[in-house]
Amino acid sequence: MHAEDFHSPDVAGLRADLALALRAAAHHGLAEGICNHFSVELPDGSDRFLLNPRGLLWSEIQADDIILVANDGTRLAGRHEVESTAMFIHAAVHRLGKPCVLHTHMPYATALTLTADRALDTTLSQNAMRFHGRIAVDAHYNGLALDDAEGERIARAMGSADVAFLGNHGVIVCGERLAHAYDDLYFLERACLHQVLAQSTGRPLVAVDEALARHVGEQTRGERLQSELFFEALRRIL
C-alpha cells in the first residue's frame, strides 16, 4: 500500500472511526492499561486490517496513531509498532469473515467468564436479550494467545457467533460496521453489569422464556439506527 492510499478519504475515515471506538471504550471504562485491541478490515478484500498500535492508552489514540497490518502481522503503514500478540487472535477471527473485531477484558463481562456458566444469561435483562442466539463460549482457557495455533483455536470456538466469551480471559465482539460492533460491546458490558449486580443480591433471578428472548433479540438487530446515532453522539463529545 502506498502512503497516499493510507491517507485516502475512505481509509482515513475508517482510521478515525477506529480511534473513536477506542477512545469511547476508555471513556466507558472498558480499557485495560495498554492491552487489548480493536481492528477493522479494509473493505477491498485484501486481507489487510487497521489496528491500534503497541504502547498507547486507548484514551490517547487518534486517527494518525492507527496502523495498517497484513494478515501475517507485517506493518504496512503507520508510525507505531505492532503488538505481536494482537495478531494471533485478530488475524484468525478476521479470517472467519468478520470485518470488525473488538477484544477486551472489560470488567463485568470478564467476571462472568470466571463463573461456571462462563457467559451472560441472555434470558435475563432486556439488554442481554439482544444477544440471544449470538453468543459462543470458549470454556477452555489455554494461556496467553502467543501463537497462530491458539488464535485459530479461539476463532474455531467462536465460529459464526457475533460474541465470544473466552473462559478466564475476556470477550470478543464482532460486527459488520464499527458503529454496530461498538454499540454491542457497550450494551454487552451493561448486560453483564446488571447480571452481576442481580446475582450479588443473593435473591433468585427471574428469566423470560426462550421465545420472548429470541423475539427481543430480533427486534434489536432489526433497528440499527440507534447504534449509529450513539456512535455519532460519541464523536461529538470525544
Image (tube, grey):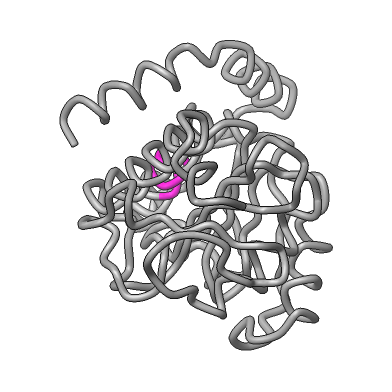
| In the displayed structure image, the side of residue 212 where residue 38 appears, left or right | left
Q: Position of residue 63 (x, y in %)?
A: 33, 46
Q: Position of residue 141 (x, y in %)?
A: 66, 81
Tell me how many marks there are: 0
* Relative vertical location of residue 110 with respect to residue 145 in this rendering, above or below: above
* Relative vertical location of residue 144 with respect to residue 61 in this rendering, above or below: below
| In the displayed structure image, the side of residue 210 where residue 101 appears, left or right | left
| In the displayed structure image, the side of residue 219 where residue 133 appears, left or right | right
**Which residue lies at the image location 72% right of the left edge and 37% below the top edge?**
44
Q: Position of residue 153 (x, y in %)?
A: 80, 73
Q: Position of residue 237 (x, y in %)?
A: 16, 30
Please tell me which residue lies in front, 111 or 234: 234
**Which residue lies at the image location 57% right of the left edge and 46% below the top edge?**
40
Q: Main secondary structure of the magenta part?
A: helix
| In the displayed structure image, the side of residue 48 where residue 7 appears, left or right | left
Please tell me which residue lies in front, 35 or 113: 35
**Which residue lies at the image location 21% right of the left edge and 57% below the top edge?**
60
Magenta range: 186-192
* Relative vertical location of residue 117 with respect to residue 4 in this rendering, above or below: below
Please tell me which residue lies in front, 106 or 54: 54
The C terminus lies in which quarter of the figure? Answer: top left
**Which residue lies at the image location 36% right of the left edge and 62% below the top edge?**
107
Q: Is residue 187 visible?
A: no
Q: Is residue 161 visible?
A: yes
Reply yes or no: does residue 210 show up in magenta: no
